[in-house]
Amino acid sequence: MRKTILYIACSLDGFIAGPNDNLDFLNAVHTEGEDYGYGEFIKTIDTVIMGRRTYDWVMDKVTEFPHADKKTYIITRQDRPSRGNITFYSGSIEKLIHRLKVETGLNIFIDGGAQVVNMMLKHQLIDEMIISLIPVILGDGTRLFQSDNNTLKLELVSTKTFDTGLYQLHYRYIKT
């Protein structure tokens, strides 16, 4: 069965963006030629789940959607027409994930944002998390994990350290 995998970076104090959706903190670990395993990870997925705010933010920065070659579901409250491989989805995220997981294919990339991640955590829809901790404390911004989530038990699969100070933690959700 396909797995849903959150692959995301956050500050040491748990923010995926600073105030005003600022992502400049990611530059603290930018090293030419280093992708922190993203290239290998992306080969293991063929479907992307992303929130509408994150999608709009990305599309404001680029001319072509970075996952145009993948089946992508943008989670939104507003109906929009599909475009190419992009489906704007306003139904039950539980139903969508359960349907996708039984389909044939590679894994499913949960690409953010925080609202989608936390909605999926509440319904125990994320199988694994690969979280890159950036050695920066932001103090404010968009939290990766919200305080109203259920307690989830995780198993550490692996850790990786990089010369830039980035730590990458790979966890698997333990179903109870």
Image: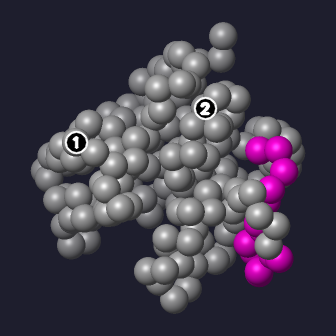
Label 1: which residue? 139
Can residue 143 be spotted in the picture? yes
Farthest residue to the bottom: give it: 63
Disc 2 residue type (three-letter): Leu
Q: Earlier in the sequence, mark 2 or mark 1?
A: 2
User: Comparing marks 2 and 1, which lies closer to the viewer?
Assistant: 1
- Residue 34 position in % (x across, y down): 26, 64
Q: What's under tag 1, amino acid-wise?
A: Gly
Q: Which of 23 and 37 lies nearest the eye of the viewer?
A: 23
Counting from the top left corner in percent of width and height, residue 8 is at 43, 49
Which of these two is toward me, 95 or 22? 22
Is residue 82 in the magenta section? yes
Q: Residue at x 82, y 44 (%)?
A: 92
The main secondary structure of the magenta stretch is loop
What is the secondary structure assignment of the residue under circle 2? Answer: helix
Which span of residues is magenta-colored?
Answer: 81-93
Q: Splitting the image into 4 quarters, where does residue 36 fall?
A: bottom left
Q: Point out which mark residue 121 bears.
A: 2
